[in-house]
Amino acid sequence: QVQLVESGGGLVQAGDSLRLSCAASGGTISRYKMGWFRQAPGKERVVVAAISWNGDSTDYADSVKDRFTMSRDIAKNTVYLQMNNLKPEDTALYYCAAKRPIGQYHYWGQGTQVTVSS
């Protein structure tokens, strides 16, 4: 059973940066594809970024490309989401999730709120 705990959210102004962290326990992140999702009020949860189980590839939603960077630290069993040039439309509850190479995302954190003021 993998547990995920996000941190690093907050209230910032447009153009600022934040780094979200997702600490995993109960399993090593090198065995899972890890993803960052976000859900804005009244909207569906969508994937923002994902990193493959072996760390060879990272994918981003078009809306965050060139602004967000996902990375991982195997030794700390933690994944990160560096968010630069934040925009008000980035305001959402951000979730970390993990999935095995085959199947759906099965493990989810509780989320961390990011609010960007204009």
Image: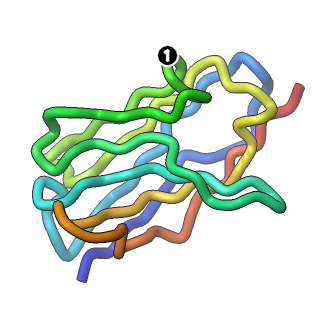
User: Closest to the observer: 48 or 20?
Assistant: 48
Left or right, residue 82 beside residue 117: left
Q: Quadrant of the C terminus?
A: top right
Structure colour scheme: rainbow
Left or right, residue 108 beside residue 41: left
Q: How far from the left and from the top, in percent, is residue 55?
A: 16, 39
Instruction: Tell me what residue is drawn at x 28 percent, y 50 percent.
Output: 78
User: Closest to the observer: 61 or 15?
Assistant: 61
Labels in figure, total = 1
Instruction: Tell me what residue is drawn at x 19 percent, y 60 percent.
Output: 32
Residue at the limit of the structure toward the right, as seen here: 118
Left or right, residue 106 beside residue 67: left
At label 1, counting other C-alpha atoms closer than 10 Å, the crowd grade (few under 14, some 14-19, many 20 or more) is few
Q: Is residue 60 above or below residue 6?
A: above
Residue at which label 1 appears: 66
User: Closest to the observer: 95 or 61?
Assistant: 61
Q: How far from the left and from the top, in percent, is residue 107?
A: 36, 73
Instruction: Tell me what residue is drawn at x 20 percent, y 41 percent.
Output: 73
Residue at the limit of the structure toward the bottom, as seen here: 1
Residue 17 occupies quadrant:
top right
Q: Is residue 111 above or below residue 80?
A: below
Q: Quadrant of the N terminus?
A: bottom left
User: Closest to the observer: 61 or 35?
Assistant: 61
Left or right, residue 100 beside residue 115: left
Residue 98 occupies quadrant:
bottom left
Q: How far from the left and from the top, in percent, is residue 9?
A: 61, 47
User: Amino acid under label 1?
Assistant: Asp
At numbered mark 1, what does the secondary structure look like: helix, strand or loop?
A: loop
Instruction: Tell me what residue is drawn at x 39 percent, y 54 percent.
Output: 22
Q: How far from the left and from the top, in percent, is residue 19?
A: 50, 35
